[in-house]
Amino acid sequence: MILQATPRVKHFGIQRKPLPLEPSVLLREANRRRASLSVGNMFEMLDGRPGFTDGSGLESSLRASPSKGNVSSMSRTNSSPGNFESSVDRPMRLSEIHVADEHALHKTISDPDLWKSLSSVEDFEQKYLDLTKGAADNYHRSWWRRHGVVLDGEIAAVCYRHGNYDLAAKSYEKVCALYAGEGWQDLLAEVLPNLAECQKILNDQAGYLSSCVRLLSLDKGLFLTKERQGFQSEVVQLAHSEMKDPVPLDVSSLITFSGNPGPPLELCDGDPGTLSVTVWSGFPDDISLDSLNLTLMTTSSVDEGVKAIRSSSTIILKPGRNNITLDLPPQKPGSYVLGVLTGQIGHLMFRSHSFSKGGPADTDDFMSYEKPTRPILKVFKPRALVDLAAAVSSALLMNEPQWVGLILKPINYSLKGAVLHIDTGPGLKIEESHVIEMESYTKVMQSDGNTSHVHDTGEVCSSVAEEFKQLTLTDGKIELPDWASNITSVLWLPVRAIDDRLARGSSSVFPQTQSIVDGMRTIALKLEFGISHNQTFERTVAVHFTDPFHVSTRVADSCKDGTLLLQVILHSQVKSTLTIYDAWLDLQVGFVHIGEGNGRPTSSFFPLVISSSSRGGILFGIRLGNVTTGDEDECLHPDSILNIRYGISGDRTVGAHAPVAVENLESVGDKQDFLFRSALVLQRPVLDPCLAVGFLPLPSVGLRVGQLISMKWRVERLKDFEENADSSDNAEVLYEVNANPENWMIAGRKRGHVSLSTKQGSRIIISIICVPLVAGYVRPPQLGLPNIDEANISCNPAGPHLVCVLPAPLSSSFCIPA
């Protein structure tokens, strides 16, 4: 419809006129005669010229006689042509003009072929095409390409008029290429619609779409708004129709894009984001894009190619400037610039330019490609984004509820909306009856144990920091508050370390070495944070728990009447103040309390306050009692049990502190007591045990690797064995030899029974053959009596701690003769 509209005004005043078939001189003369007769101006016709001869040789009888030169008037009515007398010939009739023209042509054109080409319109057009093609070829051969292409346009016009659209399209493409290359948009606007019409008739969908896009890309003033809207409707209609071979269409002149002004978007490795770009649309109306894909190109390496970003919904571009927001998936570290913009309109795939513009647009018509590219996205290399650590490194209280502090430190990264998963290991559980507390780490450090949230007495501080919140553990996870997203905070977990084993004390003679592994507990932490919880940080925090006291004993004094003063030394193992309110001792078999026998210490100085990392002592008065070795009594009271009722106070930021429920903080004066129990092994004096075990000296020649050696121990009964003495004079004693298999090889029996008389003073020698395997100072094999309690065994003399083993002697079989 557009192409069949009223012909447009030709640019630059150039008019294409049909070539005349008759001499112009005759026409001008005939028209002059007609005009002169119509106004009756005889003097203009007789303008003093001697005469007029036309191109056919016919003389005009326009000579004026002298007698008639002074004629003053003449009738303007020519009613009687026969009576008309004038020096001007009568007007030529149309038939006479044609005859004169034909006669003039015969006299002027001597070439019969040219005369034949002028005989009809078809022959004339054929001759015109031949001459034009020859001239165009000569121009092309002489490198006057512009003139040749212009003549190709004349050929295309003739072919287009005769319906030869294939040849017309080829010629029009040459002309359009020239006009577009030279930037002659006004001339291109005259020719390009004809090319589009040819391509539409030929069903060249790709070419027709390209021509429509080029028409839309021309200056807006060259076409009316309705015409440009028609071009767009043609593109959209064809895009949504069934296209045989959809091909990518370059729309770089219509759709351009760039990053928004300002610094580039900065993301951490693994983070998604939202990328905002500016898209300029040159279409006259809104156009709907079924899909829009944007590619990112790395500035450091081109081997990785491009990464496509796809729009999740349909995008409608308005004429001019559009701000498009795209979801950005996680990218690899590096710097990125905008690449190619591709998309789809129906079945039509389009493609924009392959580089981004570097700066913002001043107007909506910003279409410049001259500015350099700039990074629009920067992805940092993997780095630490957060850190999790235990707030207290000292040991906490075992088997009692404790505050375990976890320091959450964001490292130049926001933890907004973060979720912390907490999983306690074996032997540790979270107290569900208490809430989880979170506060600012700065507030904790400023408090310095004096203005903490929970004081020694359980009172609430009057000035509670704004950065404080009580959290609830749900399905093993908690959500962090927003105020903790950018500051270092401390998360307090109320936990209880469980250890069913009874604490065992030691004596000053045989000190007990404690293992840190026994009190170690672990908390598995997993923090999910980031824009869409895509960042994870996992760490297992080790927390050390211990008993409040380490108990050691020694005999302070031994009286002649068998009374012993037992001193119990309490070593504080936590960084808190411990207050002992009461203590009593449940004695094992063979010992009894003096006095009333209630097991209380001799001193009534309670409460006893033991500061952090200090010691305190308690004296108990005991004496030896009846000795029974029955299995039942030994099972009932195998060891002495020390019971201590105590309280603990301190600051949770520096050590052990029992948590108090938040709703009970206002109750003043309530104290919470704890009970500590420890097993003590009280050893009888030397003459009191039943058996004595001694290690016999080794031979003086020394020990060597690979040589047999006999290890001997002497077992002696120190007192009569009265139980079941009537049935037999001997009793079976079970022995067991323990040795490191890497250092010793036992050649004899490591475990067995020996017969020992029940009478006092009876003795027996236990001998074991063994072979040393390594040289150096090693621990020798040890003899043990499993069925006899340690309190009834006296080691005199004690076995050596280490023995020296010499290397094996050199063997001559390994020597090589010279």
Image (cartoon, rainbow, N blue to C red):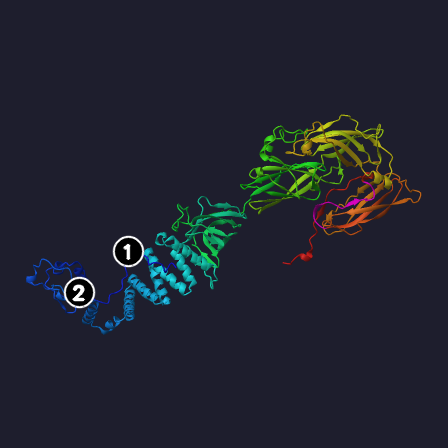
Of the pair 262 and 61, the residue shown nearer to us: 61
How far from the left and from the top, in percent, is residue 307? 50, 53
Q: Is residue 569 above or below residue 47?
A: above
Do the numbered discs 2 and 1 sit on residues whose CB atoms are within 8 Å?
no
Q: Is residue 253 above or below residue 694?
A: below
Place residue 579 in its image quadrant: top right
Inspect this view and state whether residue 479 appears.
yes
Q: Secondary structure at mark 2?
A: loop
Q: Is residue 725 above or below residue 158?
A: above
Q: Secondary structure at mark 1?
A: helix
Place residue 779 in its image quadrant: top right
Which amino acid does the dot numbered 1 rest on?
Phe
Of the pair 59 and 183, the residue shown nearer to us: 59
Instruction: Give the number of the mark in front: 2 or 1.
Output: 2
User: Which image quadrant: the N terminus?
Assistant: bottom left
Local packing at callout 1 (Cα closer than 10 Å; few below 14, some 14-19, many 20+) is few
How far from the left and from the top, in percent, is residue 383? 54, 45
Give how far apart the Cα atoms at labels 2 and 1 are. 38 Å
How far from the left and from the top, in percent, is residue 637? 83, 38
Q: Which residues are magenta?
A: 773-789
User: Which image quadrant: the C terminus?
Assistant: bottom right
Q: Magenta: predominant secondary structure element?
A: loop
Which residue bears the numbered disc 2?
Answer: 91
Q: Is residue 750 above or below residue 97?
A: above
Which residue bears the numbered disc 1?
Answer: 12
Inspect this view and state whether residue 613 appears.
no
Q: Residue furthest bottom?
A: 112
Of labels 2 and 1, earlier in sequence is 1
Residue 706 numbered tag: none
Which amino acid does the dot numbered 2 rest on?
Pro
Whether 775 is among the magenta residues is yes
